[in-house]
């Protein structure tokens, strides 16, 4: 996102929701067994002593047994170290006209529909997330259909049309979806008027797998999940006590060194905080791009992998690189990596992850004076949290820095937790707008260590 305190497109969407929604702020995705994050249960500790639980429900389908459940039409479960879902025998063919190129192509397709998941926390927002491999000549579509607390159903909402590359279709969200009770805002299902008491009580997810007719190609989906939440409004959050002094060795990349490069992808590096942060953590876990993969980048540009990340997270409808599930899906295209988007309830939960060697990409909005040392204000910005000082302050790789060497920053704990965890804030004009409510991306190994698995489970991710 841009460093400037100006409305990004995601912020405008969030503000539109906030105008009609009292209890809705920010978007989040996670995957795991159904839990209520922030409680003193398997989902982890409370946000702070005496603080109410943060109502978040997570569910994911990842195992061979999961893929054999639900409704399969032309798909098959794939066993192995990383079980998945693939095309077996296509149901037929259909024509898809890409709205961003105008080209019409014919595709074979097969579908899988998840069992109904009843939310432990009836939700005002739900966002699906997925990890998949889409070889050239394949792509996938993700849809959501839910049941409201009044007993009526939503339509099938398209939550993303996605491919790792951009040679077959342009990956895209779908605007202008709604039924008078809920709407889709880029990657987020949102109840239009939570003050009415209406909530989403359950949902199903549907995958459609596509391939070129007459081939044996197939996408393979390893992870499909969604997070539902009903986050209360708050301008401030309870303070936490420092509990960890540790720093992870995460590579440092500046988005600012890419200003003006490839403006077709969200106006160039000035807005690339999300893919820049993603690339930092991908490389922390050992993910590397080959010379062949980077051959399209101008050889005069430093850190071509950041340009690659921007291109491969770009949402052609949103017209930006900040689609959160698209970033998580990009991370999972690297060998043995998983990616999810979730909300955390406190810096204490983030400390648990850092202690297990898992950095996080956090989303926050703030005025210049609200974060000492940042030197800018922003309507939406992603940073990579890599550790904590002995005093408990946050060590972040901030891509909105003038050089790679300047990326490492230390931000005051109390300021950081408030700008990250709040759901309401005042912008530079004094208007009340939404905050992200603890949103973060988590990238971690496909086969986590026991300690990593325990830390992820403690924050509701499995």
Image: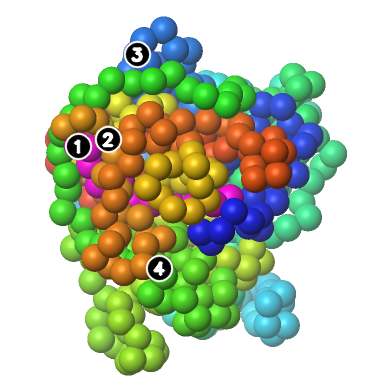
Q: CA distance from mark 4 to mark 1?
A: 25 Å
Which residue position holds label 1?
389
Q: CA distance from mark 2 to mark 4?
A: 23 Å
Q: What segment is highlighted magenta in the picture?
A: 378-389
Q: Are marks 2 and 1 in contact (CB under 8 Å)?
A: yes
Mark 4 or mark 3, which is nearer to you?
4
Residue 125 shows in this picture = no
For the point 79% across and 46% down, which residue is it?
178
On screen, residue 414 above or below 420:
above
Q: Nearer the viewer, residue 297 or 154?
A: 297
Which residue position holds label 4?
255
Left or right position of 460 against 150: left
Residue 319 shows in this picture = yes
* Residue 120 among those drawn in magenta: no
Which residue position holds label 2?
393
Q: CA distance from mark 4 to mark 3?
A: 38 Å
For the point 69% across and 50% down, which residue is it?
13
Q: CA distance from mark 3 to mark 1?
A: 26 Å
Q: Residues within 10 Å of mark 1 (few under 14, many from 20)?
A: some
SS type, badge 4: loop
SS type, badge 1: loop
Q: Could you say which quadrant of the image residue 427 lies in?
A: top right
On screen, residue 261 above or below 317:
below
Q: Residues within 10 Å of mark 4 (few under 14, many from 20)?
A: many
């Amino acid at each position: 996102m841009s460093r400037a305190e100006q409305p990004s497109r995601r912020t405008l969407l969030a503000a539109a929701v906030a105008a009609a929604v009292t209890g809705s702020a920010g978007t989040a995705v996670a995957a795991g067994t159904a839990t209520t994050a922030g409680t003193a249960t398997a989902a982890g500790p409370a946000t702070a002593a005496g603080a109410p639980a943060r109502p978040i429900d997570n569910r994911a389908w990842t195992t061979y047994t999961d893929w054999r459940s639900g409704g399969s039409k032309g798909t098959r479960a794939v066993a192995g170290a990383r079980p998945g879902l693939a095309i077996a025998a296509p149901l037929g063919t259909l024509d898809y006209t890409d709205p961003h190129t105008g080209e019409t192509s014919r595709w074979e397709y097969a579908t899988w529909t998840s069992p109904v998941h009843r939310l432990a926390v009836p939700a005002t927002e739900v966002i699906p997330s997925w990890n998949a491999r889409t070889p050239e000549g394949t792509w996938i579509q993700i849809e959501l259909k839910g049941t409201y607390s009044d007993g009526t159903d939503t339509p099938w909402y398209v939550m993303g049309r996605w491919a790792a590359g951009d040679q077959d279709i342009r990956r895209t969200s779908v605007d202008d979806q709604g039924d008078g009770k809920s709407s889709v805002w880029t990657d987020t299902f949102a109840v239009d008027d939570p003050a009415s008491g209406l909530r989403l009580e359950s949902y199903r997810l549907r995958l459609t797998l596509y391939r070129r007719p007459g081939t044996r190609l197939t996408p393979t989906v390893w992870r499909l999940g969604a997070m539902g939440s009903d986050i209360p409004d708050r301008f401030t959050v309870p303070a936490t006590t420092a509990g960890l002094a540790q720093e992870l060795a995460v590579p440092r990349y500046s988005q600012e060194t890419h200003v003006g490069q490839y403006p077709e992808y969200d106006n160039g590096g000035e807005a690339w905080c999300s893919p820049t942060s993603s690339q930092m953590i991908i490389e922390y876990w050992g993910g590397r791009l080959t010379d062949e993969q980077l051959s399209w980048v101008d050889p005069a540009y430093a850190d071509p992998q950041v340009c690659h990340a921007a291109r491969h997270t770009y949402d052609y409808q949103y017209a930006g690189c900040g689609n959160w599930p698209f970033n998580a899906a990009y991370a999972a295209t690297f060998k043995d990596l998983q990616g999810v988007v979730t909300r955390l309830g406190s810096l204490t939960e983030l400390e648990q992850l850092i202690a297990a060697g898992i950095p996080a990409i956090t989303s926050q909005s703030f005025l210049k004076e609200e974060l000492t040392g940042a030197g800018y204000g922003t309507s939406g910005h992603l940073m990579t949290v890599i550790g904590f000082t002995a005093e408990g302050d946050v060590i972040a790789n901030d891509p909105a820095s003038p050089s790679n060497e300047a990326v490492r920053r230390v931000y005051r704990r109390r300021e950081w937790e408030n700008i990250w965890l709040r759901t309401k804030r005042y912008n530079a004009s004094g208007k009340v707008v939404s905050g992200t409510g603890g949103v973060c991306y988590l990238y971690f190994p496909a086969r986590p260590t026991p300690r990593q698995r325990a830390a992820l489970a403690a924050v509701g991710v499995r």
